[in-house]
Image: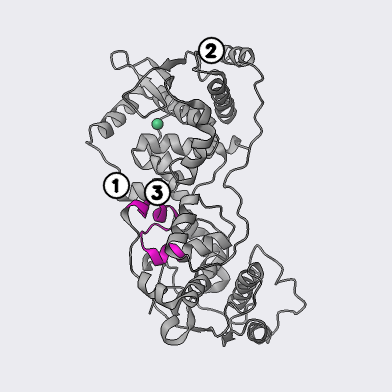
Amino acid sequence: MILSIIPKSILPQKINTNKNIFFKGNINKTELLSDSYQPSASSAQIINEKLYQQYQIQSDIDDPALLYQIYQTIKDYCEINDSNDLFAGLKIRTDAIDDTIFENRHFEEQTITFNKNFNFKYLPKYTKKLYEKGMIPTDNPLYILYLAFGDYLLYKTNPKTYNEQTDKYVKPKDEYISRFLTNTARIDIFNKNYLAAKMSGVNLPDAANYLFIKNRKDCELKFPDGSLPFAQKEIPVFKSMQEIKEYLKKLGIKAKFPNPEVAKYFAEAIYEIIKLIGDDKIFKGLKIKPWQNNATKLIAALKVNNRNPKKACIVIRTNYDWSKQAEKSKIDYNCCYHPYINPRYIFVHELAHYLDWKANPKAFNEVGMSFQNKERKMSDYEKMVAQKVSNYATTSTIEFCAEYIAGKTAGINYPTETDEMFRKNWHGIKINFSNNS
Ligand SMILES: [Zn+2]
């Protein structure tokens, strides 16, 4: 069985591997590189012996650059799972293969074959490129190898399940979770990318964890603790409504809030976004109004006046239980619906709409109407890129921009492809995300 994740179009040109050049690349983890042996003509042989003695892996690979990275990968999997037997019986080798970095032939031979024509010295750089294109969820230099060896572990745990899931697709309702991670809805590809992401220390939303457990409850591997994609930021705590009112007054904002909790979220949102833009006059004239509405599920919105295109205000639902919003926002994050946990980013999102509208009301209204009237739809490609931000970001380019700004303000980094889609679709006031810290 041959499994390939790397499409031909983005494979680098055939590179002549010079076997005499030893790997001095930038693998993050330097543990192996600081080991006692020096690179020498026999370093490949030394690593191969270690692989066999410690992990019962048979290798005849003679490329030290590849071997260093393989050894680190195996070590990471075995250490976190407290077992040196995970890969016992596996064979690894290099060969000239088409279109892909590695091939797994588990059923016939329990072998992973690495492409002889790929220069593994450049694997970290290549991985970064894949990440920037939005094809994988992290630029961890070992990602592809976590993937290759994780796939073997999925096979070894249960060859029957592995076989049954190959080339199969997740249920339509789970597609967005799979695409959040891998750009495809295939079960087998999602599973191995899940392992690689977890091994890389990526914190995945609960929906991804549940989907993996649903697919492979037989797989009891342990993973390093991942950290959230954003830092928990310190924002000046507004101590009273009075303080919030004074702060907003200084900015030229007239506001009425449903309750003090919402006012606090809102003031924090304004504070963050002003810090990002560096202009405290930007919201001068903005009005915030309470909103009683039973006909919508929206809890906050930018309301644009069609008769007077120069007027807009942010409305906040009053007939809504805001006291549970901290919990609800956590759920929204964990099902990939929004890219943040703290409810203040709901208002960063609305303020982003305001900045979009303010710089170019005509463009904002036109794009908004074209999606509302269904004259325009996101293309499959746009949806794929927007899904890296959130599920809600796939509903229109306007929502994509607002969700992107909310995610960026929260401190999330996105692939270049996603950044570019924002640049293409943003008509609003210029934002310098490098001010974010
Ligand atoms: Zn919106």
Identify the amino acid type marked 1: Ser
Residue 223 shows up from this direction: yes
Q: Is residue 190 inside the magenta stretch?
A: yes
In the figure, is residue 175 to the left or right of 121? Answer: left
- Whether label 3 lies within 8 Å of ligand 1 gets the answer no
Spatial CA distance of label 1 from label 3 is 10 Å
Magenta residues, start to end: 173-191
Q: Are marks 3 and 2 in contact (CB under 8 Å)?
A: no
| Mark 3 closeness class: few <14, some 14–19, many ≥20 residues within 10 Å | many
Say if 92 sits above or below 149 in the image: below
Residue at 47% over, 63% down:
193
Q: Secondary structure at mark 1?
A: loop
Could you tell me which quadrant the N terminus lies in?
bottom left
**Marks 3 and 1: in contact by CB < 8 Å?**
no
- Check disc 3 and report its element: helix, strand or loop: helix
Which residue in the protein does label 3 denote? Answer: 385
For disc 2, the marked residue is: 252
Q: Earlier in the sequence, mark 1 or mark 2?
A: 2
- Amino acid type for the residue under numbered disc 2: Gly
In the foreground, 117 or 200:
200
Q: Position of residue 222 (x, y in %)?
A: 59, 64
Residue 61 colored magenta?
no
In the drawing, does residue 30 fall left or right of residue 211?
Answer: right
Q: Earlier in the sequence, mark 1 or mark 3?
A: 1
What label sits on residue 379 in the rendered view?
1
The CA distance from mark 1 to mark 2 is 39 Å
Main secondary structure of the magenta stretch: helix
Q: Considering only order in the chain, which callout, 2 or 3, is on the residue closer to the N terminus?
A: 2
Q: How many marks?
A: 3
Cα–Cα gap, marks 3 and 2: 36 Å
